[in-house]
Image (spheres, rainbow, N blue to C red):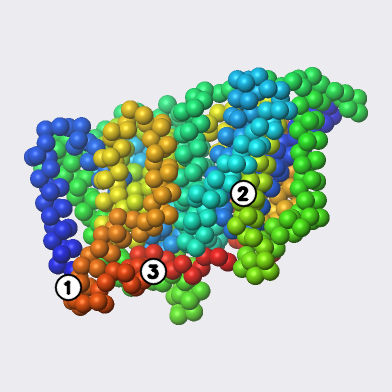
Amino acid sequence: MTLFFQQLVNGIALGSIYGLVALGLTLVYGVLKIPNFAHGALYMVGAYITFVAAVVYGMGYIGAIAVAVIVLAGIGVALERVVFNPLRHAPRLHSMIAALGVLLFLEAGAQLAWGAEFRRLPSPFSGTVVLFGLPVATQRLLVIVAAVAVMIGLSLFLKRTTTGAAIEAMAQDRAGALLVGIDTRKIAMLTFAISAALAAFAAALVAPLNLISPTMGEAVNLKAFVIIILGGMGSIPGAVVGGYLLALVEVLGGTYISSSFSQLIAFAVLVVVLAFRPTGLFTRGV
Amino acid sequence: MRVPTTRILWLAALLAALAFPFLTDNLYFLSIVITAFITAIAVYGLNVLVGETGQLSLAHAGFFGIGAYTAGILAVRFDLSFWLALPTAVAVTAFLGFLVGMVALRTRGDYFAIFTLGVGVVITGILDLWEGVTGGTDGLIGVPPPTRIGPLTFESLEAQYYLYLFCLALTILAVRNLSRSLVGRTLLAIRNDEHLAEAIGINVGRTKRLSFTISTSLAGFAGALYAPFLGYLGPSVSGLVMMFNMLLYLMIGGAASLAGPLVGTLLLMAATQGLLAFEEYQLLILGPLLVLSIIFAPTGIAGLVNRIGQRLSDRKTKPGPSAAPSSPSPKNRARPSHAPPHAEAGN
């Protein structure tokens, strides 16, 4: 029972990370219709920025997270301006290939800047707290609380503010949004900024738990795509639910079935879902 | 009028390729060109699917890996002769490609790209983890070079060079015939507008599966040639970097053109030899190069050359103000044959 409870907490913590990463991916897909294959690389760069800010420049963990989020938001805007905006009218194929170019560029850049070896970010919250009579790592609790807070904040932003409504409007119809006076250029940049910032936030939260390396984003990237296919490409609640679902199945399956199973589960889900529902589980009408 | 020019160019290229081993004693150059030949075969396979059918498969390097490992394992663990291992590896890759295509092609567009990305990751994972068969992370060591057939032996690098050149020429001929055939036109019709293709009576599903199988067979063919040439294999032959390189060669050379894959592969492989010392950092230059070429020259080198050729022949046939390049028409004229229409963007 203790094992189950601990794995449940692990699953929820992992799901919070997956959810944040998938949220950014689904947001960009929903608003700009770009499957951003470089999203996992943004996550990886976010982890490194946190590491550098915290360890090299000796900022506090919280400060380092803020730095990573701001830097990545900037990188997101730059990506939109330099790469994806010029390809707005090109065939979809071209944005996808360009995203791959960005992915490998960022991985090589990280390797040049910080080396290929694994790094570990020490957590200031290394202890455990007792929850319902069972011990839980403080860092994991922090991951869950912070991620849920950000998810709620994002959904309030999208539902309650004018800018959020503009983002949703653009997701529904870019030309229509432009017609009613929405600055689609600004919204496109904002969407990329939010997306990259979410990836950085997720990476910063998970950095003390996992190792940091230039290729750490690859597996997360594929999983985030599986999640948004599961939850419906472009759907915000779908990304959150899908993130928790995949993480729980992975963690519990890894515990009770086999640990190599957990590596394969994401792909198995992808194959099964797409084999039976080629357009995803919860696809909105086109 | 332009047909003879292209034919002369191809013939000149062939003569140059035939003469190349006599012009250099440098075995290192020779082996680079051989690697480029083999890679170009795989890139031609990618072109059938990405360039001509308009489906972005990110599993192509995976199938290259399957072909390479099948040929390598058959030669190393079963002592099979190259001439049996080669067709077996192609058949295995084609069959697996057909099976994957059955499932993958139920999806379209973005979903297809994502699905094949997953397939590629899983193939690399299997090559990495199935240690008993593939040698795992250590790789498969000691794949013998091509064995003799009849009076022909392939011990020297020069002899191997001609073998791989022959295979490349065969591939180019086959791909040329394919793109000129009815099937080739059908592929273009699907790329340009899937719904329209369906409406005029094309069996889109079957044609796409055929295209996918042809594409993966060529990847397997290239892989099966790669294993005995290199002599060892690691899981990275099917990895993301390989996939990226193939797409880079295709896009720079020019997708949906006959010369593009060859030109792109030769040019970039030669150019990146200078960067070999910084192998991990090559991508710092190549990544942005791919992005820039897609933004500014989406039709690649072949498209640019074609456009210049077209403009020259325009000037010859109708001199006068109508040939002035300032009119917007030259851009539009070059487009239909090389790039998918841009109309689909934005929705």
Q: What x and y, as percent, mark residue A74?
A: 60, 41
In this view, the residue farthest toward the left is: B22
Alpha carbon separation for disc pair 1 and 2: 49 Å
- Seen from the viewer's position, the closer of residues B97 and B340 is B340
Alpha carbon separation for disc pair 1 and 3: 30 Å
Q: Is residue B242 visible?
A: no
Helix, strand or loop for disc 1: helix
Q: What x and y, as percent, mark residue B181?
A: 30, 70
Helix, strand or loop for disc 2: helix
Q: Is residue A187 above or below residue A215?
A: below
Chain of the residue where label 1 is placed in the rendered structure: B
- Seen from the viewer's position, the closer of residues B318 and A280 is B318
Residue drawn at the location 36% of the way across and 71% of the way down:
B328
Residue drawn at the location 41% of the way across and 31% of the way down:
B280
- Residue A133 placement, left or right of B237: right
Residue drawn at the location 53% of the way across and 33% of the way down:
A215
- Residue A226 placement, left or right of B38: right
Alpha carbon separation for disc pair 2 and 3: 34 Å
Q: Which mark is drawn over residue B316?
A: 1
Q: Residues within 10 Å of mark 2 (few under 14, many from 20)?
A: many
Q: Which residue is mark 2?
A: A192
Chain of the residue where label 3 is placed in the rendered structure: B
Verify CB contact (< 8 Å) between mark 2 and mark 3.
no
Q: Amino acid at mark 3?
A: Leu
Q: Which residue is mark 3?
A: B188
In this view, the residue farthest toward the right is: A132
Q: Quadrant of the N terminus of chain A?
A: top right
Q: Is residue A144 above or below residue B57?
A: above
Discs 1 and 2 share one subunit = no
Q: Which mark is drawn over residue A137?
A: none
Residue drawn at the location 22% of the way across and 73% of the way down:
B314
Chain of the residue where label 2 is placed in the rendered structure: A
